[in-house]
Structures are given as C-alpha cells and as structure tokens.
Amino acid sequence: MHFVEVILPLSLAKTFTYRISEAEFNFIQKGMRVAVPFGKSKMYTALVLDIHQDEPTLYEAKEIHQILDEKPIATEIQIAHWLWIASYYMCAIGDVYRGAFPSGLLLESETVISHKADVFIDQTALTDEEYLVYEALQQQSSLKVQDIVAILNKKNIFPILQKLIDKDIVVLQQEIQESYKPKLVRYVKLHSKYDSNQGLSELLDILKGAAKQREIVLAFFQLSAAEKKPITVKKLVEASQSSSAVVKALIEKEIFEEYFLQQDRINFTGKSTEKELQLSLVQQTAFEEIKTSFIEKEVCLLHGVTSSGKTEIYIKLIEEYLATGRQVLYLLPEIALTTQLVSRLRIHFGNKVAVFHSKYSNNERVEVWNQTLGNAENAQIVIGARSALFLPFADLGLLIVDEEHEQTFKQVDPAPRYHARDAAIVLANFHKAKVLLGSATPSLETYFNAQSQKFGLVTVTERYNNVRMPDIALVDLKDKYFRKRMTGHFSDVLTEAISEAISLGEQVILFQNRRGYSPIIECITCGHVPQCQQCDVSLTYHKHKNQLRCHYCGYSMAKPTNCHSCSSIDLTTKGFGTEQIEQELIALFPNAKTGRMDQDTTRGKFGFEKIIDSFKNREIDILVGTQMLAKGLDFDNVSLVGIMNADNMLFHPDFRAFERSFQMMMQVSGRAGRSEKQGKVVIQTYNPNHNTIQQVTNNDYAGMYKEQLYDRQIYKYPPYFRLVKLTLKHRDFDKLKEGSIWLYQVLSQNLNMPVLGPEEPVISRIRNEYIRTILIKIPQNVPLGGTKKTIQKILNSFEAVAQYRAIRVVTNVDFY
C-alpha cells in the first residue's frame, strides 16, 4: 500500500492521505500538485507534502485522480516556511497554501472558465479535446469545470485546461480584463548633427525658404531654453501655433528626431546602464557598516532619514549578492511603489528584475512563479508586495524589506494573517540568507531589537547631497479660525505657500487621511446622521457620484434631499476628505492642475501608474492623497507638503496611534525638497504643543522612541508583551455575548497572563455581524509555542460546544 500526504487549498488545519499505485509512488516527489476528489463530488488541486506507507486509521483513503506536474513546483524550504507561518500565526496550513499559490495553479471544480476575447486562434493547432472545449465556449460565455467534464465525458480534465490556459485561449473568471495600455508620448529633440554652433548656422541656412518650419525650430529653442525638460510634439505645435504636419516634415528632413517615452525613461538612449553607481561618502560608510554587521548578525536595520539615498545602498548590496549567483527579494509596502522602483532597478540590472503582486493577472503571476523556481536569468531580483514572500526561491541570498515600519506588511484578511517583515526574517533563516530592514522611522519593535543587539544597526543622519531637512511650520487651527484666516480648510499660511510654490513652477503634495468628500452628513434640525444598514458606521459622502457609501461593506445610496428622520431639508456635511480638498483647491487655484490619489482613483492594474506618471511628468501641480502618498515615492520637483489635519491621526483608539502619526508625518514631510532647494512642510493642527507633533518638528526619533517605550512597558504592550487578538463574530447579539464570556472565562482560568475582554470594538457591527474582541498579552519570559498550543486547545473545545459552533472566531497574532 502506498500513500501520499497532501495539503488541500481549503481552510483546514490538517493534511489528508490519499492512495497511490506503486508506479506513482516512485514518480511523485514532495512539492508536486495532484488532482484529488474531496467530499462527494468536488475536485481540488492538492500539494504533496509527504509520501509514505502508513494507512490512515480513521477513514479509508481515496485514490488520487492524476498527477499534474512532471517536477515539483514548490520547494521543501517553502513548505517548511508555510508550516512555520501556520503554527506561528495560528491558521490552517490550507489557508497558507491557498494564499501562497497563484490561482492559475489552483484549478478546482468550482473554477469558472471563459473564452479570451479578440485573440486569433489557430484551430488546426488544437487537439480534438481542446477543440471541443473551445467550440463550447463559442456558444456560451463561460463554463464551470463540471460542464467541461460533461462535454469531454472524462473525469480528468485539469491538464487539458492547463494547456488551454498556457496557450492563452481561455482565462479564469477571477480576472478582470484590463483595458489601459501605458500611454506613449511623442517627444522631439534636435538631430545630433546640429548640436554644435556651426551646425545651428547650417540649420538656419537650410530653412531660409521654409518660414513655417523655421518658426517651429525657433519655438523649439525658446521652449528648451525656458524649460529644462523634454519637449513633446503637442507642446511644440501649441507654442508655435502650427500643425503637426510641419513637425513631421522636419522629422523626415532629419532636422528633428522623434522618440517615445512611457513613464519617464529620460535615458532613452540607454547609455546610463554602463556607468557604475557612485555612492557618496556617507552612503559608502553605511554600506561598509552593513557588510560588517552581516558578518555576525542575520538582520541589520538601516535607519536613514528620508531622502538619504537608501535605495542606492540597496542597489550596491544587490550587485554584490548577484555576483555570488544568489537571488534577491525586495519587499515593498505598496504596489504603488513598485512602479517607481522597477524603472530605477532596470536601469542598473536590465532584465534581471521580476515583479510580483496582486494586480498582475494569473498568467503573469504563474510565469514569475516558474521563473523564480527555475532560478531564471530574468528573476534574479524579485520585487513585490508582501505576497512575493511565498515564491519558490531556488537560492535566496538577500532580503530587503523597505519601509519596514509600514502596517501594510501585515495581512488583515483573509488568513494567513502574517506579517511580511517577521516572516521574511524566518524565511531568510531557512535559506541562510541576510535581511536588511530599511526605514526613516523604524517601528518600535525593530528599533528595540536593534538596541538590544539582536539586530545590527546602521544610521544615516544626513540627506543625500547634503540637502537640508525640510523646514516644518506648525499652524494652529484654533487661532486661525478665531482670527477668521481660514478659506475652507486652508489656513492663510498654507494658501500663500501653495501659490508661491506654483508661481515658481514647483509641485505640491497635500495629505489628508480620509477619502470621499466628507465622512458625515448631519441634519441641522434634529441631528440625524445617515448610518449604514449593515454596519455601525455613518456613511461617507462622495460628491462626484452624488452618493453616500459605507467604506466597510460597500453599501451605497443616493444623497438624500431631506432628512430621513424628520424630513427637514437643512442637511450639512461634517469633516472632510480628499475629494473635498480637491474641490476647494479648484476654487482657490483655478489655473493649477490638481490630481487625487486614493482608493477611489487607483482601481485597476495601472491605476497608480497613471497618476504617478502624470505627476512625475509635471502634468499635475497639486496632488491630494491619503497615506498612499506617504510611502517612499521620489519626486524631485516637490517643494511643499501640506498636512491638512494632523489630529485625526493622533487620537485614534490604538496603542500605536502616536508612533503611527509620527511615522506618517515624518514620511509625508520627507517627500518635500528632495533636490537642491530646502523643502517646506505645513502642518495644520489644533494641538501644536502636542509631544508627538513637536517631535516631528524637531525630527526627534529618539525622543519619540523613549517616550513610547516607557508607555509600552507600563501598559504591557509590545515589545515587552506579545499580543494575540481573538475576534468573535455572529449575527445574534445575545448568543455572541454569551459565547465570548464563556471563552474569556476559560482563557483567563487556564492562562497565567493578562486576558482582556470581551470588548466591543469601536465599530461593533459590520455586514450585520456583531463583533467582540478578546486580547491576550503574553509576557516575554513565557514560551510562545506552549501558550499558543493552549489557546488553540481552548478554541477547539469552544468549537465543540454545540450552541457556540456558529460563532466565527478569527485569531490574529501580532495584529499591529
């Protein structure tokens, strides 16, 4: 008897045993995929964990359907890492497997398959079975796996589907078709033979007879003298009030050369790749220190102020590791950042860079997966958001976690709820690789680890090229409102600073951490505020769609004309979001171009690129945005950053509120003045004397660190205590209350440590489910593994109680 142990892509904590023949037993290896029947009629793609000869005692093992791979597509290190994630973050191994694999590799009987539009298909190249599926899809827009089983009258169809997917004939339904193609802009430059002064006089001779062409050439010189940036055909035609036909004639005469830019590849000649990257003295010192620290320690923290040129140091390190033939993983907190970084890295490393994140389609993700597994030339460096951690690296040498303090490295839903930074350190351990964490405002835990000698620490205190840190001005809103010096939400200081920056042709970034137009609509007569029907939140007003939306469940309704409670028509908006700031800007600065970057404007695969590119190409003067803007974006022309209201970050009911606000404000300020001129930051606040705001003004990380650490110790928070948060959800309020109290009592009896709860969170109902939370604080000296086992046992016994079975419990380890 021969058996395989497999993981199913379902939220199940245990593995399952299936029967195989002797031939299969000799062929199958760990990390291959097999199609297996599960339940009455479902088929899943499972992953082989082990091969053995022990018959299961509790159930009769079914036979597998077929083997889907010729060679393993997951590595042993990968599987070991998944098992660690499952045990540390207390989730099912099936969840990790489903989260890690691109869905293109996880066919199951529920998958919906549809025909790819506008693709020419050579029907003669299809086998009979493939043709049958193709023909069926001509008749119907989409088919389920079950339907295809019926059409082909055979059970195992996964290989056929896989071939059709590889041939790009069909797509899985989960994908949304993306229509945006990156826009190419047509630019012109003077032909190289006219570069010298002598060339110019020749040129004017040639054009004696052609007045229109001559005008265009003169306009070109005026423009290039006035603006030190590439000149688009569109701009040239407008400036000379001529037509593009004349420009075309000049190109044909070889007086102008045309070239196209997508994003801002200003180095269109491709010369920049050969020259070596030169580090400044400070960067070079930091680089040497990092290498020294790697001799003794596995992890090193690079604490460098914003714009201190951390990326160059990373590039230098990557060069060294690539020379040894090992792979490099570069993790970023936001998909928005990958765009900027990829173009910077491609200049140095050409096509060795692969990108992996969730806005890529299935086929693209499967491709990167296979390249990484095969240690291909074009996947030596993998850049991605947190999910890139799960790729099957052949030989990983270095992991860089940039902006390591970012909360987006923590996955919130669905399971596995892992923290990419911590999981990366463990992964590096498996690969015997090194980890470099980089940040201008490291998280307290990381800095604490560096101070207690667990990690190495390298500090860079000055910006690149000795650019000065931005000048920070605080505006007291109480005082400004009192003196009537506010226009909408803009104080006179901010308005003046914006007009000054715009008149100098510089760009401005405004930060407001709320999207939409305004968070609340209130009736002046009776004070009624429209609430979401399914959640405990007020609805946010979005003006351009004229509707109220819930940002939790997506419920929306048209903006009411009168109050739903007392029918009065006096409705007013309270608070403000990015949309309102944008509207006010248009009124205040009608000649400036404004743009907005938040969840509503960056949907779709290229959402970020569109906005970042147009800001980079200086088509937008003022960019308003939420915290997406705060991450390490690099714009050299931004001289002013405005923080619209610093207080709504400070007084958040969260033990990290002050630390987060400090990081956020420092990061946003860091976008200002990244070239020669000193930048300016205007922070509007009602509490200018608040400690945290003062620490931002003085760029005092150490002060913030000491103050927060003192608080954390008193109130038993990390890094002194580990936190496990249990969230219970159910539609019945009383049953939930009863269940949560039962769970709390059992936990506090069995655990010798602080257990808090059961507490109603700030938003205590989402999508008609009531919520209660229980918080367990594990002291540093108590073994983590044992405690988690105890908690898991108690949770299992909670599920065994019949009347509480319907209550969903979500475990979140290190939820911050």
Image (spheres, helix red, strand yellow):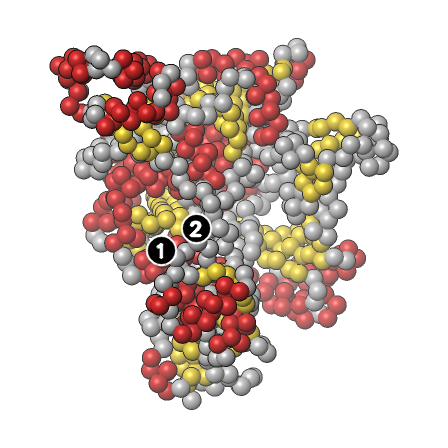
Identify the mark at residue 193; answer none if there is no mark: none
Q: Residue at x 72, y 58 (%)?
A: 730
Instruction: Give x and y (percent) for residue 32.
Output: 38, 71
Q: Quadrant where the N terminus lies?
A: bottom left
Q: Residue at x 21, y 12 (%)?
A: 208
Residue 184 visible from this viewpoint:
yes
Near mark 2 (Cα within 10 A), the count class, few <14, some 14-19 or many ≥20, is: some
Tell me how far mark 1 sits from mark 2, CA to CA: 10 Å
Asked where in the image residue 375 lies, by quadrant, the reply is: bottom left
Identify the mark at residue 368; answer none if there is no mark: 1
Instruction: Give x and y (percent) for residue 775.
Output: 63, 52
N-terminal of the pair, mark 1 or mark 2, is 2
Looking at the rendered structure, the kind of residue marked 2 is: Tyr
Residue 662 visible from this viewpoint:
no
Identify the mark at residue 360; answer none if there is no mark: 2
Dot 1: element:
helix
Instruction: Give x and y (percent) for residue 12.
Output: 55, 68
Instruction: Give x and y (percent) for residue 261.
Output: 33, 33
From the viewer's perspective, tell me whether residue 632 is left or right of residue 371: right
Residue at the farthest bottom position: 1
Looking at the rendered structure, the kind of residue marked 1 is: Val
Residue sitting nearer the eye, 429 or 116: 116
Is 553 rendered above or below residue 804? above
Residue at the farthest right position: 566
Residue sitting nearer the eye, 86 or 750: 86
Near mark 1 (Cα within 10 A), the count class, few <14, some 14-19 or many ≥20, is: many
Residue at the farthest top position: 483
